[in-house]
Image (cartoon, helix red, strand yellow):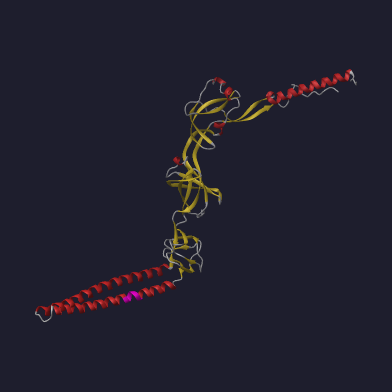
Amino acid sequence: MFTLPSGKRARILLGAALAGVLTIGAALYARGGGGSETYRTTKPERGEIMSSVTSSGTINPVVTVTVGTPVSGIIKELYADYNSQVKKGQVIAQIDPATYRAQVEQSQGNYLAARANLEKAKVALIDASRTQSRYKSLVKDGSVSVSDYDTYATAAASAQAAVTAAQGSVSQAKGAYDQARTNLDYTTITSPVDGVIISRSVEVGQTVAASLQAPTLFTIAQDLTKMQIYATVDESDIGKIHEGGNASFSVDAYPETRFSGVVTQVRNAATTVSNVVTYTVLVGVDNAGLLLKPGMTASVTFETARKADALKIPTAALRYKPKTEGAAATQAGQAGQKAKSGAKRVYVLREGKPVQVSVTVGIANDKETEITGGDLKPEDSVVLESLGVQKTASASPLGMSGGMGPPR
């Protein structure tokens, strides 16, 4: 059996012992023995604060008119295109009128024939009435029999009925004639308003078919300088928004520009999608510069409250909790402190330790929260977050200026 020399064996044992001590010391140092915990803090400050509700929506003209046609046919001419400025009554398209012109001529002929038949029936009535009158005087003196008189009286009544029937035929023919002329007029498509064409759905030579509803040919925005946003707002926030309230928004086309608007309508009709209930809010927008275009997506911020001179702290301070919350709450005479009803709590730095104080909050947003009451003082340093343990660089696990290794 091999045996180490006694001197060398002693040095090995001493080195192992020192290594164990260094390991234990390093562990204690890492657990905080080499420094104290530091915090990021801020002072309460006074200034303007605003609470808001965010949403998104689509920009559209205030008045949009769809132009269609109640008659079917082939588009023969187009006199307007996308972005065309049009006036009320201006011709913007033409459907081939040949078929409808033929129908007008045919119905006109029927109308004229019906009027001629009416005149003929009136002449027959005059003749029958004259004959009846002559026989009426003769039957009194016995020159003709009563039965002969009755025959002519019946003929006169029949002639009167024929006139009435002819008058009905004239009315029917006139109605068909008027309808044919109206359909012919419908083949000429005119603008119903002054505005700008923002959509065109047909091409020259295309056949449009008017069956159950009139097909849409054009969409006209009456005034692009007045726009509105159709924003969707969650049911939890809709109670904060009211008509006349201020709103601001941005669009992807101008990311550095903030536009303003006013709430013009809060609609009561709810929309439910995947169990999420939302309401439509209309925001009126002045678009005098014509920067905004129909269909743009707007990120809207609704202003719900504003205060000019408020005592405020970062909202992050309300979310901070120390790791040893129970011990921290008892520092500086705060033992047994409980938050008041309806109050929040924040932590302030007292003698290097976070101490819990109760506060009452008012207007709030994602960044800042108004403090309306409580135990917070203007000179307090409000804790936002812990920065960890600040260690002393010159200290070693054994409290020496340098490490110690095993003897050689």
Give the image quarter of residue 162.
Answer: bottom left
Q: Which residue is found at the position 52% from the left and 50% from the top? A: 297
Question: Between 331 and 50, which is closer to the camera in this rendering?
Answer: 331
What segment carries the magenta color?
109-113
Q: Is residue 297 above or below residue 209?
A: above
Left of 273 or right of it: where is 186?
left
Place of residue 65 in the rendered image (x, y in percent of width and height, measured from the top left):
44, 58
Question: Between 67 and 312, which is closer to the camera in this rendering?
Answer: 67
Q: Is residue 408 above or below residue 205?
A: above
Q: Quadrant of the N terminus?
A: top right
Q: Is residue 230 above or below residue 165?
A: above
Q: Which residue is found at the position 51% from the left and 66% from the top? A: 203
Place of residue 41 in the rendered image (x, y in percent of width and height, measured from the top left):
59, 30
Q: Residue furthest left?
A: 141
Place of residue 19 in the rendered image (x, y in percent of width and height, measured from the top left):
79, 23
Q: Is residue 398 magenta?
A: no
Q: Quadrant of the C terminus?
A: top right
Left of 395 or right of it: where is 88?
left
Q: Which residue is found at the position 73% from the left and 22% from the top? A: 25
Question: Between 43 and 38, which is closer to the camera in this rendering?
Answer: 38
Prevalent SS, magenta region: helix
